[in-house]
Image: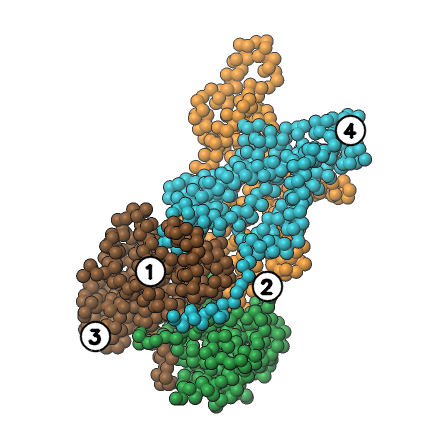
Chain colours: A cyan, B green, C orange, D brown
Amino acid sequence: MSVVEGVLQADLRPKPPASRRVLAWRRFARNRLAVAGLVWVGIFIIVGIIGPWVAPYSYTTTDYGSANMGPSATHWFGTDSLGHDMLSELLYSIRFACIIGFGATAVAFVIGAILGLLAGMMGGIVDNIIMRLVDLMFAFPAYFLNLILVIDLGRGILPIFISIGITQWSGYARLIRGLVLSLRGGEMVEAAISLGATKRYIALHYLFPNIIGNVIVSLSFGIPYALIQDAGLSVVGLGLRPPMPSFGNLVTTGAADMMGYPWLLVFPAVLFAITLLAFLFVGNGLQEAFNTKGASK
Amino acid sequence: MSDILLDVRDLTTHFRRPDGLVYAVNGVSFQVRRGETLGIVGESGSGKSVSVLSILGLIGENGKVVAGTAEFEGVDLLKLNRHEMRAVRGREIGIVFQDPMTSLNPIKRVGQQVMEVMLVHRLCSKQEAWDRAVALLEEVGIADPHRRMKNYPFELSGGMRQRVMIAIALACQPKLLIADEPTTALDVTVQMQVLSVLREAQVNRQMSTIMITHDLGVATNLCDRVIVMYGGQVMESAPVEEFVRHSAHPYSRALKSSILEIGSRGRKIAPIPGNPPVMIEPPRGCPFADRCLLVTDRCRDEIPDLRIIAQEHVVACHRAEEVLEHVAQ
Amino acid sequence: MAIAKFLTKRIIAIIITTAVIIALSYILMYIAPGSFFNQQQVGQQAQTLAAENPQAFQAMMNDWKERYGLDQPLYLQIWRYIYHCFTLNFGTSFENPTTPIMDTLKSGFPISFILALGSVILSTIVGIPLGILAAVRKNTWVDYVMTTLSLGGQAIPSFVFAVLLMLVFGVLIPIFPISGWGSVQQAVLPIIALAVGNIGNVAQYMRSSMIDTMGLEFIRTARAKGVPEWAAVLRHAFPNSLIALVTVIGPQFAFTVVGTVWIENLFSIPGLGSLLNQAFGADDFPLAITYIFILCLLVMITNLLVDICYTILDPRIRLK
Amino acid sequence: MSHSELLVVENLSKTFKVPGGTLKAVQNASFTLGPAKTLGLVGESGSGKSTLGRAVLRLIEADSGSIVFDGVDIRSLSTKELRLKRKDMQMIFQNPLSSLNPRMTVERNIKDPLIIHNIGDAKERSHRVRELMERVGLSENMARAYPTELSGGQQQRVVIARALALNPKLIVCDEPVSALDVSIQLQIISLLQDLQREHNLSYIFISHNLAVVEYMSDAVAVMYLSEIVERAPVDELFAHPQHPYTRVLMQSVLKVPESLAQRSTFSTLPGEIPSPINPPSGCPFHPRCPLATDICRTTKPEEKMVGDQHQVSCHQAGVTAQVI
């Protein structure tokens, strides 16, 4: 037995097996704004799920008798010019925003992840073609592509989130390709190759776990971005087809009447702003917790 | 004029980390004489760099000197305000850092960076600074200095950049030059070049030098006196000749035998077991106790004081005499 | 020499990309169900004409198709549009067949450009110092307030912010006009509305970039030379951080130009944005293509300028 | 002769395309390595020693030349065959942390090769991991730690355990101790030597430190600017260094002097390694060589035998033996 092992045992101080996830959570929890954001996002999602059941009225219910009323006991947030109950409109907006925000991000991510992984893993001509496509997407004013796609596909929930998704994938593709490339050239992957690992194994056990943190951060910034895009469609009248309510629709119509009926603007605008802020706080907190840089958009 | 240029006493420096304090330097004392080259040797985490850089307040925002004095020509550097400290940095004390690749501003021309230190201290006009910078580059062995003045750091090799760093450190004729692992990041042949530049500069300019290094070979070949640090404390300090012959600390001796020299082949090696300590708790007992072959209970409980065991030779070990006796046999 | 080669290469790339984008947009609009190429585009009178005099209507339709090149095969139509765009001959819109789009552009584009430029300049001037301040005072209340505000600025879309500004400064404390264009006062609110998000973006980016740079070793070297702290920050850290910031400011400009369309609608400013509802809301495709062409060109030219800025700011980067 | 060798490398060359032209990373490298032997590969940064080590394992595909390992022509293997062959040839890296998977525990990292090659069941694997950890000097309570929580020396032990897991015949060690503290360096060197004896391992030991290479190796190849300039059994090389560069490297190893009189003069070569993109004409070493003559500037020296198994590429070799 060599000197080394004999004496070594003594001074190896045992360390508690603190999992990385636990550590990351602790870092996140220290950031109060991020936690507040997460709570808000949580409520937002829950409301998004149960909203339509608790909504006092349907978004199609019009009541001209009580149009343009200020906040009251029967209509907590007032009513609009068609007598829609503002609270119900907001609850449905949250539902639709949830679907569009998460749906669009999912579409963008799936496209981006597949192309990014292909580009990063295959390299060569595949990489070249995909990257030219990414360049093209960056040069194409996303908002206008979005408008055209909405015109092509329609103004329902599904067409809108698909359209937004199609305009947003290039960022994910570039991020994932960059991460894969930086890892692929590194010693860790070289070590895995020298162990005899297959490409599949390396992708699954070496690349994926090491890029997931950055990807989550990027996704958390992607959701509010998709919501802004959605609202932007409403501004030129190409958002969700009325009477379906959305933050964009409510803010745009509210703005038109802001002198007369300010509550029509204030409630949706403030709610929307807080929600976006909450997502950004969460993203920011995740970024610090995972200690990633450059993963945000 | 006192013979002592820099007198550091009981220096204690802590670092704040998210998970607690790091006790980086724990009551370190040393002196630098005028004109001498002092080598401070230790492994990573020994506190060798921190103990010197904290005197100048260059240890970042998480580091804090919590106790001690550092008298430079009779003035305690640790009591200076920001403004007074700036007048010392670069002017009275020049510093060369480890990695020449990252220590120079990547987007400023080399000449500008050498001139800046003279201009900041208002030593001369811009024109004169240019001429002096050219002369400095020449002094540190950079060929074609006029052309090099206009180069950016990325256009120079590692060795050249380290020469530029030395030129910056020497520019204001400092009384003390601090070299923090100046050769570690360089290729072996270039290491030799840089060491020879440092030795020449030291001889020609009659300044004092502190050479911080992990390499006992560098310290013993370059320096007049050697200090060995471990776990944020001084283990031993002696003139180099005394040190190479009669080092009395078990760690110093272990360190010496850890160095592979040409001709070591076939020699039975006895590595120091264990790992260097991570100083996350206040020191209790001798920091080397865990790895020491001569350890006793006393070593674990009582921090050994620095004791004089020969002229100018101090050592912090309860069993130093036994070590010396053992060697003598 | 190298510069000429670099520019040639980039300009060719810009032309190709723009052409591809025009083609793509055209095809996407062409396949859109029931819009853009709908007969309704010829106007209300034509509908009555179609019922009363099918023959005259047919003649009119043919005339109309010919005017917009719709009688030709698709690839020729696309080619025609690409060619027309690059020769700046945008034709006329469906809505207003007598006024060339070029005339509308001439009056609208400068307004949008000024708005966007004003907002980018404002956000740079305000955002950079804020970012530096937050970086220097890292982890103090200054930093926290700044970070929160800049996240807030980014979270609230410019059109929401515009509405709030109109409410506060136009209605509650009426010190600025909330509509129209022509005077400096009229530009204040729209430019601020556009700039808020950008300020947050620039400040936050500047902050993190400065914090990174301040941690680098050459900053320690500067301190070791006796350089005052403000000079270490402004002379050493700032220029290095600026390199990273250019990446953000460039695309931001193009993004802001897009943002102007919302703001112009809200403030009734006769810029390019006022045409947007018509282009996309009323499926006026010659107008839409022109829009896309201009913006795409703007994005690419900005990117080119960003790359040139890089080489000026960073000697390590060479034009390729 | 090559019958008894584990590894025979002949005329291996590798060129990289880089923005400024082509970079000749390794040119015509040839060497042999016997079972349970160590070849030391020494040179400064940019000498091509790491590329050569990786090319031997086909972690980098060489452009030309042959690699016969264990009687098999490595360069002609299919991807699948190569993957299986990797069980016999492993690698240890300079920076252990960057070569371990930070998202896997120590135990999982060491177990990884067993999983990849589907060796044993879960129980056997766990047992093997414990065994390996004990052998390289890692205590059991570290099994669930993550690599970042270990010290540099401990991380390198994990890498060594992982490389050992498949019972390889050859391990390429790329500067395995350079990133470590002096006291830890010796621990790792000692461990590597013990393992070599126990498992009959062959090493290619890459280092810039001639003293470490001398200590570890049976034969040494000195590289300069992508070429092996001198190669000999270790005793022969250190007793009779022929290439001026070898001698300079030997002088660059500082020893602790016995007295002030014995201190190093730090005398060395002028200049630094030229860019391998634009190598000098003739002998690549001539711009820095104190013995260079006209022929060195114009003609590339041929490899010649100057002693038993002692090869050198230098026009002046044997002519002048005086100390530089």
Q: CA distance from mark 4 to mark 2?
A: 60 Å
Q: Quadrant of residue B163?
A: bottom left
Of badges 4 and 1, nearer the viewer stands 1
Q: Secondary structure at mark 4?
A: loop
Q: Residue D171 — which label?
A: 1
3D distance between C-alphas at marks 3 and 2: 62 Å
Q: Which mark is residue A67?
A: 4
**Camera-nearest residue between B189 and D127:** D127
Distance, label 3 to label 4, CA atoms, is: 107 Å
Q: Quadrant of the N terminus of chain B?
A: bottom right
- Residue C260 position, x and y percent, is 61, 39
**How many numbered marks does the figure carry?**
4
Q: Nearer the viewer, residue C253 or B296?
A: B296
Which of label 4 and label 2 is nearer to you? 2
- Residue D171 drawn at (x, y percent): 33, 60
> Where does the C terminus of chain B fall, quadrant-wise?
bottom left
Q: Chain of mark 2?
A: B
Identify which amino acid the numbered label 4 is placed on: Ala
Secondary structure found at label 3: loop
Residue picked out by circle 2: B19
Q: Earlier in the sequence, mark 3 or mark 1?
A: 1
Image quadrant where residue C165 sits: top right
Check disc 2: other Cα within 10 Å, few if <14, some if 14-19, many if 20+: few
Marks 3/4 in contact by CB < 8 Å: the verdict is: no
**Callout 3, which amino acid?**
Thr
Q: Are marks 4 and 1 on the same chain?
A: no
Chain bearing mark 4:
A
Q: Position of residue D152 (x, y in %)?
A: 45, 65
What residue lies at 40% left-to-right and 72% top-to-bottom? A3
Q: Are marks 3 and 1 in contact (CB under 8 Å)?
A: no
Q: To which residue does mark 3 refer?
A: D320
Residue at image point 60% right, 79% down: B68
